[in-house]
Image (cartoon, rainbow, N blue to C red):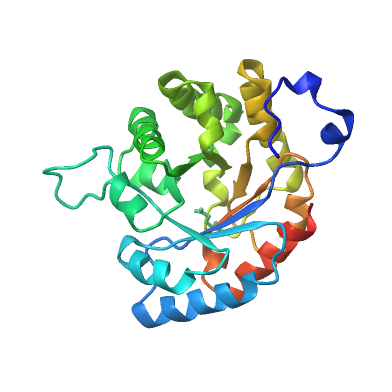
């Protein structure tokens, strides 16, 4: 049950226990082959049967979506894409529309990943537009935000994350966030093996939730904020124990079923 009233009217017991279902989503990036993906999907599907409370999702490259849909049919594992077009249809060579992802049974789509922002020049306006088209098609966008190492060293983490968040809020309204998920991914922790400490991550997660609560307390209370950046089987439990960390967006460790499932187990146990 999602309580939609004002947060200060929440029954006391609800404010004392975590009420957000954790989500562990695998971001496979540009990895995989037909045989490797078939094996990984089979492993995730088999292991996910023992995940009782957390939600599990995988985001393979586009070309593997049909086989992902087929392999995961009948399981509780959801799937999504890593990117989508800002446009809805037409002459956009090489692009993939939100409606196509929906057609292939995607639940989620990642928007604003730092690799898209830095390597493909996606600015806040493009990311906000992608969030909007995903939502309009009935997909749940996973909006990635996070600072670079340089920005952290300059102590502007909060300003950067606020700017990335506000671009979506200003375009779509704060209530739109309830249709998606946020992923806090410090750029310096992605693929580097250098994870944010649970305290560092919690601090930014709490900042994000507070900033949203200033505009809408109920949206903030229900919103899932995932951590991403070198999360693995060894550090997941500690991160997920923090009150504002509601799951993970997993890159490298999502490419091996046992490693990914161990993180899902940690999320399950975090409730
Ligand atoms: P990583 O990637 O887990 O390999 O650091 C996370 C991500 O980029 O989403």
From the viewer's perspective, tell me whether residue 162 is left or right of residue 268: left
| Horizontal and vertical percent position of residue 23 | 62, 52
From the viewer's perspective, tell me whether residue 143 is left or right of residue 194: left
Q: Nearer the viewer, residue 240 or 232?
A: 240
Callout count: 0
Q: Is residue 235 visible?
A: no
From the viewer's perspective, tell me whether residue 176 is left or right of residue 194: left
| Horizontal and vertical percent position of residue 43 | 56, 78
Residue drawn at x 53%, y 31% as measured from the top left: 177
| Horizontal and vertical percent position of residue 149 | 54, 41
Placement of 47 over or under 126, stated as above or below: below
Q: Quadrant of residue 133?
A: top left
Placement of 271 over or under 147, stated as above or below: below
Residue drawn at x 43%, y 79% as measured from the top left: 38
| Horizontal and vertical percent position of residue 258 | 63, 76
The quadrant of the picture occupied by the N terminus is top right
Q: Nearer the viewer, residue 45 or 167?
A: 45
Q: Nearer the viewer, residue 254 or 58?
A: 58
Residue drawn at x 41%, y 60% as measured from the top left: 29
Q: Is residue 259 visible?
A: yes
Residue drawn at x 41%, y 63% as measured from the top left: 60
Placement of 270 over or under 65, stated as above or below: above
């Amino acid at each position: 049950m999602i309580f939609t009233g004002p947060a200060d009217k929440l029954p006391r017991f609800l404010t004392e226990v975590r009420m957000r279902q954790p989500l562990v989503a695998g971001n496979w990036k540009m990895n995989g082959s037909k045989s490797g993906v078939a094996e990984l999907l089979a492993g995730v599907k088999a292991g996910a049967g023992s995940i009782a409370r957390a939600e599990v999702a995988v985001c393979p490259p586009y070309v593997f979506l049909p086989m992902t849909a087929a392999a995961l049919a009948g399981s509780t594992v959801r799937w999504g894409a890593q990117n989508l077009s800002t446009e809805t249809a037409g002459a956009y060579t090489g692009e993939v529309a939100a409606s196509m992802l929906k057609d292939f049974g995607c639940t989620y789509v990642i928007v604003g990943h730092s690799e898209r922002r830095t390597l493909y020049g996606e600015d806040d306006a493009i990311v906000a537009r992608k969030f909007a088209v995903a939502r309009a098609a009935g997909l749940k966008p996973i909006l990635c935000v996070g600072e670079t190492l340089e920005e952290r060293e300059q102590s502007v983490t909060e300003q950067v994350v606020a700017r990335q968040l506000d671009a979506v809020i200003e375009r779509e309204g704060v209530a739109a966030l309830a249709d998606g998920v946020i992923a806090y991914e410090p750029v310096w922790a992605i693929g580097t093996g250098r994870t944010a400490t649970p305290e560092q991550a919690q601090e930014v997660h709490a900042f994000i939730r507070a900033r949203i609560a200033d505009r809408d307390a109920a949206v903030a209370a229900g919103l899932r904020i995932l951590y991403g950046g070198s999360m693995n089987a060894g550090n997941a439990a500690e991160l997920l124990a923090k009150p504002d960390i509601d799951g993970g967006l997993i890159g490298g460790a999502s490419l091996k079923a046992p490693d990914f499932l161990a993180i899902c187990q940690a999320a399950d146990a975090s409730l």
